[in-house]
């Protein structure tokens, strides 16, 4: 991730899920900015709250440590490029992070917990009014996320993937069952959420300092949802996951009293939501990954079916699945979908 000092003006594309990113050096100097181009083929499965990531970053400057700078170039705001490395990953359970990185993540949560919704009133919002709920209405917050998933992920892609969803046992009735299981959360004061704190959105620089990037999915809402999303995406070893939950609770409660209320019961509920959410997004992404426009990737089919079987098994409880399809049944469903497509 280090731009070479003797390279050309542009470095890239650095490929992420939502964007292809190019790194530009300003005036041949040592300052680098990011220019991002949304990938044409991407499907957006996440609700976006703020109109401009750059405007949000400007507002957070001085309130949250080690965020990308926003530089004005020809009347436009560009994010500075952070030189360093992202956190390492491995298949299955993620690797533990060092104590130094762990402590900096905890500090990030503490600083975010201090930012109340009124401090961000000046940042224009893009989310619809119907998707906003009153401060502290954690049930309403989660219910709006479920409705968004139903409308913008499931219903929007029903024509192309409806038969595949049905064959995997996750039709429209799944959302009725999910809403029933997800109700009854404790009320917590809302705050700023990054909503996408995974290993590739953390960059460690040459001095060991941790930077947090890609705030595009940030929102205002239940702080415990941010912890659940972080734990789900990071795949910490079990002991480090328990430690992170305990440290999160300690610092968030001091910074935003009541912000960790109900963690013992509600964290499992929110983790179940993340497992259920992954079913609908991964079914579409995995299915699309089996075709590159030149034909069906037969060699990747067993892997794809195994991945979906793991995701369905993890979400069996929140989606109330009586039975998870077998590996061969999932392969047959994927083949049928591509023959139909």
Image: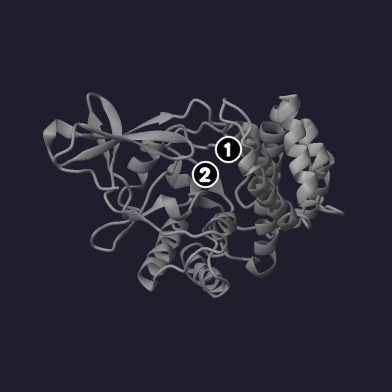
Q: Is residue 212 above or below residue 24?
A: below
Residue 103 relative to residue 311: left or right: left
Identify the disc placed on residue 70.
none
Residue at point 74%, 43% (across, down) = 331
Quadrant in the picture for residue 112:
bottom left
Circle 1 crowding by C-alpha within 10 Å: few under 14, some 14–19, many from 20: many
Which SS class for mark 1?
loop
The residue tagged 1 is 47
Q: Position of residue 23 (x, y in %)?
A: 28, 36
Residue at point 43%, 65% (across, down) = 106
Residue 240 in view, yes or no: yes
Residue lying furthest right: 322
The residue nearer to you, when weighing 322 against 187, is: 322
Q: Between marks 2 and 1, how big is the CA–CA gap?
A: 9 Å
Quadrant in the picture for residue 85:
bottom left
Q: Quick check: marks 2 and 1 in contact, CB under 8 Å?
A: yes
Q: Position of residue 318 (x, y in %)?
A: 77, 54
Which SS class for mark 2?
strand
Q: Position of residue 70 (x, y in %)?
A: 28, 39
Q: Decide which of tag 2 and tag 1 comes sooner along the chain.
A: 1
The residue nearer to you, when weighing 170 against 58, is: 170
Quadrant in the picture for residue 22:
top left
The residue tagged 2 is 219
Residue at point 74%, 31% (across, down) = 337
Numbered-mark total: 2
Residue at point 65%, 52% (across, down) = 274
The residue nearer to you, when weighing 132 against 197, is: 197
Q: Is residue 286 above or below residue 276?
A: above
Q: Which quarter of the rendering shows the C terminus?
A: top right
């Amino acid at each position: 991730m280090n731009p070479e000092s003797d390279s050309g003006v542009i470095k890239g594309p650095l490929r992420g899920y939502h964007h292809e990113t190019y790194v530009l050096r300003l005036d041949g100097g040592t300052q680098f900015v990011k220019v991002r181009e949304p990938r044409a083929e991407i499907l957006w499965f996440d609700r976006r709250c703020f109109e401009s990531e750059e405007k949000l970053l400007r507002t957070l400057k001085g309130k949250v440590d080690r965020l990308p700078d926003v530089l004005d170039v020809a009347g436009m705001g560009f994010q500075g490029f952070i030189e360093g490395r992202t956190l390492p990953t491995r298949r299955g359970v993620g690797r533990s992070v060092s104590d130094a990185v762990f402590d900096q993540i905890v500090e990030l949560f503490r600083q975010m917990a201090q930012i109340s919704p009124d401090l961000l009133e000046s940042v224009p919002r893009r989310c619809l009014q119907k998707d906003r709920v009153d401060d502290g209405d954690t049930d309403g917050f989660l219910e709006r996320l479920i409705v968004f998933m139903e409308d913008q992920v499931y219903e929007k892609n029903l024509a192309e993937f409806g038969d595949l969803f049905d064959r995997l046992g996750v039709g429209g009735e799944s959302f009725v069952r999910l809403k029933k299981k997800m109700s009854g959360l404790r009320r917590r004061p809302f705050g700023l959420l990054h909503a996408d704190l995974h290993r590739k959105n953390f960059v460690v620089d040459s001095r060991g300092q941790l930077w947090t990037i890609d705030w595009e999915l940030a929102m205002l809402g239940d702080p415990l949802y941010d912890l659940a999303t972080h734990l789900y995406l990071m795949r910490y070893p079990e002991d480090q996951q328990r430690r992170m939950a305990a440290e999160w609770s300690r610092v968030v409660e001091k910074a935003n009293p009541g912000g960790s209320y109900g963690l013992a019961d509600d964290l499992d509920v929110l983790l179940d939501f993340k497992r259920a959410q992954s079913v609908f997004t991964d079914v579409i992404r995995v299915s699309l990954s089996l075709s590159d426009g030149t034909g069906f990737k037969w060699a990747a089919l067993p892997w794809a079916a195994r991945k979906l079987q793991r995701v369905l098994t993890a979400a069996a409880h929140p989606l109330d699945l009586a039975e998870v399809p077998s590996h061969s049944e999932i392969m047959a469903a994927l083949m049928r979908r591509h023959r139909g497509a």
